[in-house]
């Protein structure tokens, strides 16, 4: 369809110019590092997914089904730990950010390639330590490690804390690298007002990463020290204050939800443009709202502590500040919709995920405003309503955007097309499965089913069964994706350089890109996603 | 060796740009270090508010006089690092090495005093958490003060050790002639790190030793 591949076929690309194992393990190529991260986070997703299915199967019946209560506590903790720390936080920035950010800026490299490689190994080491803790005896504290329970629990909390601590370093390095790259490695012609919005999103995320992660790191160390040396910072029996833990934890972890969601929003912006064949409506608004979210995100942590005994006044302030996030998010949503409106919509698989994303984000965001209302939250706190809220917004948006990115950039990364029809079926299964899984949980929460409980009254069973059915659909959808993507690596049609006809700058490179991204320095003579000028497809 | 160790990497386009990247990267890193320490400062503020008298009492168990000496040592060493950067900017690698060696000596002096202080605490039983054995101060508050004391000064000492190895590595680079008037990014960046270690101490010192 696209003649631009002619001539680039015979040239070596980043995948085949060197093929030894060593050349992969010691690579400083941001593209290979992105691929390595992709493999690692997919593994984490699989592991977290298996734990999720175990939980849902257990909840099929009101009483014990397949495991005992202690095992259940461990399984939900491991599910949360794996999904949040090992998958959702690094997934989009480390995998896709590494791969496409330099391409989008016309750079040959990230600013610190050696550090970048180190970040893979640090992540892997942290993940390994976490897994070790899981295999050893797991943890039963929940992914939030609330004190004082986490300082006394007999399970393997310490290695898991340290594992997460180590992963934090990987996050900081990645963020530092992206910020510096964006500042110093833009190709000529790439001025600030032309930077693709995915890069802006990753940039905003990186700022949160370097600001928030050290706080988390220290607080995890403190809990670990408390377990090992009884230092008593959080232990009330030694004069410490357990609520201090919550403040510090949520000072990180509320912004952390934006570490997950902002990159997702960046992906969505790219995909919306590409498949509406229009430049984004409101470039500045989207970029600015990214920073609005990042900023406000730091002042809303207290909405997790409405029932911790903080003053009503404080809660009110935190509630109102939290609601500001909804405004910035709404700006983005309106801009995406406005971009699609009047665009030449091409409903390909990535765009399907965008629609899923917009639905889940809107719904989850509105329930966010509801739970930020103190009086309502007292009813919903620690119930399945919260579980549903954060799965809708956090998991829903990260998963949808991750899958959108995976399908959108797959041909760029591996030079192969995936079978559209199968992908379409899988996308529908996943979106439908997701809604069926978590919608009933809002109702369960409203009926009063507490989160992290192993048993429930039998009136609640039908909703739980529904939820488990949805989860099974989700699992099926993922299985399908796994199969056809692996299949496409070998048997998929070879992709032209720009299979979607996108005007995103990353498509200036060949698919897959050469070892140094571009053969000649790319020239950025138009705005990103400018579909008004006709452009001869050109691969630099 | 590979292109990795040659000072200029082509993909940066220009030398200024590479040096800017290194500085920016270091500043961001330093910012995140500040936030790492910030936790402990917040913890200090909170517990001082809970146990005001005990904290003041406990601070009398610290050697404020020696801490003043330490402060002087560190500030002087920072000055030497500034000199080192100044020397290498005009190409005097030998003098840069000398300045850094002096800075390292002062830093080591600091650590020796710190070690001696720790030894005293050990003898006295002024230790963190469950090792706390100081009878004349209530355990509530007292053990927290020493916990925070050891965490703050310990974390600072770890940073000093890292800083010392960075300085040592720079001295070695000066000996083998790696740095010139044109190429000295690592000296500047390493110097920044040392200044940060210094600045942390300038917060820790009044907070732990001087506040009444
Ligand atoms: C944009 C993305 C958002 C993400 C990723 C997100 C994620 C989360 C997560 C993970 C939790 C549960 C934490 C736990 O395990 O206890 C949570 C709870 C909460 N969220 Fe959100 N949230 C988002 C947006 C919002 C918004 C816009 C608001 C308010 C306007 C909000 C208000 C709340 C409140 C009040 C809670 C705590 C409820 C409770 O524990 O009782 N969230 N959110
Ligand atoms: Cu929050």
Image (tube, rainbow, N blue to C red):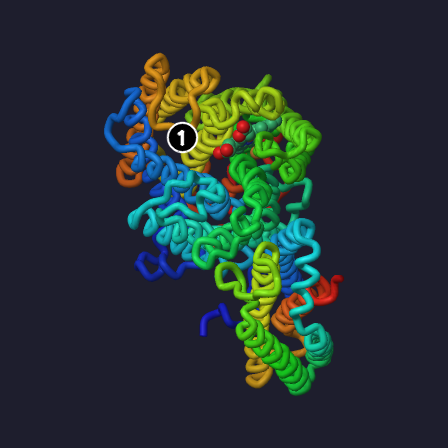
Where residue A68 sits in the image (x, y, percent)? 27, 33
- Mark 1 burial class by Cα count in 10 Å: few <14, some 14-19, many 20+: some
Q: In terms of image quadrants, where is residue B25?
A: bottom right
Establish if A367 lies above or below A229.
Answer: above
Where residue A20 sits in the image (x, y, percent)? 30, 59
Q: In the current view of this chain or complex, which residue is farthest to the right? A: B212
Where residue A494 sits in the image (x, y, percent)? 34, 38
Asked whether residue A421 appears in the rendered view, the answer is no
Q: Nearer the viewer, residue A303 or A228?
A: A228
Q: In terms of image quadrants, where is residue A350?
A: top left
Q: Chain of mark 1?
A: A
Circle 1 sits in a helix, a strand or a loop, which is it?
loop
Ligand 2 lies in which image quarter?
Answer: top right
Where residue A209 sits in the image (x, y, percent)? 57, 47
Q: Nearer the viewer, residue A441 or A91?
A: A441
Asked whether residue A254 appears in the rendered view, the answer is yes
In percent of the image, x 52 and y 63: which residue is there? B132
Establish if B162 lies above or below A69.
Answer: below
In percent of the image, x 30 and y 24: which residue is there? A472
């Amino acid at each position: 369809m696209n003649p631009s591949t002619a001539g680039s076929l015979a040239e070596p690309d980043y995948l085949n110019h060197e093929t030894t194992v060593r050349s992969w393990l010691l690579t400083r190529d941001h593209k290979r590092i992105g691929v390595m991260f992709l493999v690692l986070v997919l593994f984490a997703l699989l592991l977290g997914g298996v734990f999720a299915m175990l939980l849902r199967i257990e909840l099929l019946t009101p009483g014990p089904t397949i495991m005992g209560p202690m095992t259940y506590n461990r399984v939900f903790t491991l599910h949360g730990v794996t999904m949040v720390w090992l998958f959702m936080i690094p997934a989009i920035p480390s995998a896709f950010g590494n791969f496409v950010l330099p391409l989008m800026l016309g750079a040959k490299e990230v600013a610190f390639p050696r550090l970048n490689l180190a970040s893979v190994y640090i992540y892997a080491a942290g993940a390994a330590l976490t897994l070790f803790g899981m295999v050893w005896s797991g943890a039963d504290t929940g992914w939030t490690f609330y004190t004082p329970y986490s300082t006394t629990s007999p399970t393997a909390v310490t290695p898991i804390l340290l594992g997460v601590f180590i992963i934090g370093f990987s996050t900081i390095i990645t963020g530092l690298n992206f910020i510096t790259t964006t500042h110093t490695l833009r190709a000529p012609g790439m001025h600030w007002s032309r930077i693709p919005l995915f890069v802006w999103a990753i940039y905003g995320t990186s700022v949160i990463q370097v600001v928030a992660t050290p706080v988390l790191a220290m607080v995890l160390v403190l809990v670990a020290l408390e377990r090992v040396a009884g230092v008593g910072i959080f232990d009330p029996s030694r004069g410490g204050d357990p609520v201090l833990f919550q403040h510090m934890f949520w000072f990180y972890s509320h912004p952390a939800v934006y570490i997950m969601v902002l990159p997702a929003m960046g992906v969505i912006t790219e995909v919306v443009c590409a498949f509406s064949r229009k430049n984004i409506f409101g470039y500045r608004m989207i970029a600015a709202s990214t920073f609005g979210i990042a900023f406000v995100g730091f002042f809303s942590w207290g909405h997790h502590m409405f029932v911790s005994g903080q003053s009503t006044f404080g809660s009110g302030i935190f509630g109102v500040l939290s609601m500001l996030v909804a405004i910035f998010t709404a700006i983005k949503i309106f801009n995406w919709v406005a971009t699609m409106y009047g665009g030449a919509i091409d409903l390909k698989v990535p765009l399907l995920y965008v629609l899923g994303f917009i639905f889940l984000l809107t719904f989850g965001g509105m329930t966010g405003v509801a739970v930020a209302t103190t009086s309502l939250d007292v009813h919903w706190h620690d119930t399945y309503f919260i579980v549903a809220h954060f799965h809708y917004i956090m998991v829903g948006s990260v998963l949808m955007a991750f899958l959108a990115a995976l399908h959108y950039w797959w041909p760029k990364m591996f030079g192969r097309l995936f079978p559209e029809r199968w992908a379409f079926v899988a996308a529908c299964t996943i979106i439908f499965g997701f809604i069926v899984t978590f919608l009933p949980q809002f109702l369960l929460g409203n009926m009063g089913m507490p989160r992290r409980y192993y048993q429930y009254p039998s009136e609640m069973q039908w909703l739980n069964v529904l939820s488990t059915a949805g989860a099974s659909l989700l699992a099926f959808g993922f299985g399908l994706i796994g199969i056809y993507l692996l299949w496409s690596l070998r048997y998929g049609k070879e992709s032209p350089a720009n299979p979607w006809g996108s005007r995103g700058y990353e498509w200036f490179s060949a698919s897959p890109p050469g070892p140094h991204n571009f053969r000649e320095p790319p020239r950025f003579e138009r705005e990103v996603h400018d579909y008004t000028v006709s452009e001869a497809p050109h691969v630099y | 060796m590979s292109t990795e160790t040659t000072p200029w990497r082509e993909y940066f386009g220009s030398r200024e740009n590479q040096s800017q990247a290194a500085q920016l990267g270091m500043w961001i890193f330093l910012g995140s270090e500040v936030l790492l320490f910030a936790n402990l400062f917040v913890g200090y503020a909170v517990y001082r508010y809970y146990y005001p008298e005990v904290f003041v009492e406990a601070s009398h168990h610290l050697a404020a006089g020696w801490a003043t000496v330490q402060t002087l040592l560190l500030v002087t060493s920072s000055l030497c690092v500034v000199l080192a950067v100044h020397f290498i900017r005009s190409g005097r690698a030998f003098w840069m090495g000398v300045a850094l060696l002096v800075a390292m000596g002062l830093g080591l002096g600091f650590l020796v005093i710190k070690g001696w202080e720790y030894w005293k605490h050990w003898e006295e039983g002024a230790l963190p958490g469950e090792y706390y054995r100081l009878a004349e101060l209530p355990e509530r508050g007292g053990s927290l003060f020493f916990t925070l004391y050891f965490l703050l000064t310990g974390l600072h000492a770890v940073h000093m050790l890292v800083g010392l190895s960075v300085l040592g590595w720079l001295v070695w680079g000066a000996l083998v002639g790696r740095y010139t008037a044109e190429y000295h990014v690592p000296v500047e960046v390493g110097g920044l790190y040392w200044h940060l270690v210094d600045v942390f101490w300038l917060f820790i010192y009044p907070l732990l030793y001087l506040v009444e």
